[in-house]
Image: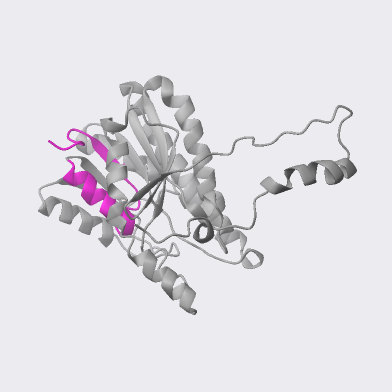
Amino acid sequence: MGVLDGKVVAITGAGRGIGRELALAAAKAGGHIVVNDFGTSTDGEREDDAPAAEVVKEIESAGGVAFANYASVADPAGATSIVEDAVEQFGRIDAVVNNAGFLRDRIWHKMSAVDWQQVIDVHLNGAFHVSKAATPYFREQQSGSFVQFTSTSGLLGNFGQANYSAAKLGIVGLSQSIALDMARYGVRSNCIAPFAWSRMIASIPTDTEEQRERVEKLKTMSADKVAPLVVFLASDLSKEVTNQILSVRKNEIFLFSKPRPIRSMHRAEGWTAETIASDLVPAFKSDFYGLDRSPTLIDWDPI
């Protein structure tokens, strides 16, 4: 008996990389899987249907059950078709894993409106469209799990990824609101920020020795390490876990904090720009955040 026996799981972006490993693991755990993949390159250009079809064949060859969907999550009708295929093929939908995405990395002053919009459309709007399509079914059956993929680029920041960072942090806000709104129906929503080598990060520069060392460390964090957490969150084992931000880094699992007030300062007569500069900034400065990124904040080797 697998922990996903009897469950139907839709996984977006499941034709390659992390998504492929999630689909294989969920099928091995007994789930019936809708393998969605639009078949794009790493920069979002349409290629072919082969990735999703190949993963379905791989699952079926191993004795599992899967169905391929080739829609774009950025298209509301396409996103809805992912959930509809799950219900038509397998009779229900129990979990949605919003993993689909691509990169259009540009340093901020060179980022175009197109670079911005296309990344937001797939990552943030795609997560909304697919989640929204599953919601009526989850609400009616009084159960369901949303697994939303965020990134440390959104949680901690990164160079050249204003579009991606904004989308991924937006997904955290989306997930939090879903978790709060849907708790009364027994539905949960959680985020995962994966550390894993995939084609999406294979373009990281290796011009310096430091960059080469970083890439070699990233290569040790294989995509299959993310799968057990997804299987757990999609299963009934996670029925008490909702509204959390988790991260997988090789054999480590992190729980991330959320923004909360950490300092307060009162001035009975109110504030002026001058008193903010003279009184508040010196008091708060020790708690101000620097220009940090994940490599500086999580600086130990993957375990």
Residue 68 in view, yes or no = no
- The residue lying toward the viewer, choosing from 167 and 36, is 167
Q: In the image, is residue 22 part of the stretch drawn in magenta?
A: yes
Q: In the image, is residue 16 part of the stretch drawn in magenta?
A: yes
- The residue lying toward the viewer, choosing from 161 and 85, is 161
Residue 80 in view, yes or no = yes
Region of the chain picked out in magenta, as a range: 1-29
Image coordinates for residue 62, horizontal then vertical, percent: 11, 52
Asked if residue 211 is positioned above or below residue 266 in the image, the reply reads below
Residue at figure coordinates x 32%, y 50% from the top left: 226
Image coordinates for residue 285, horizontal then vertical, percent: 73, 48
Image coordinates for residue 36, horizontal then vertical, percent: 31, 50
Image coordinates for residue 48, horizontal then vertical, percent: 31, 63
Residue at figure coordinates x 21%, y 59% from the top left: 54
Q: Is residue 253 left or right of residue 34?
A: right
Asked if residue 268 is positioned above or below residue 200 in the image, the reply reads above
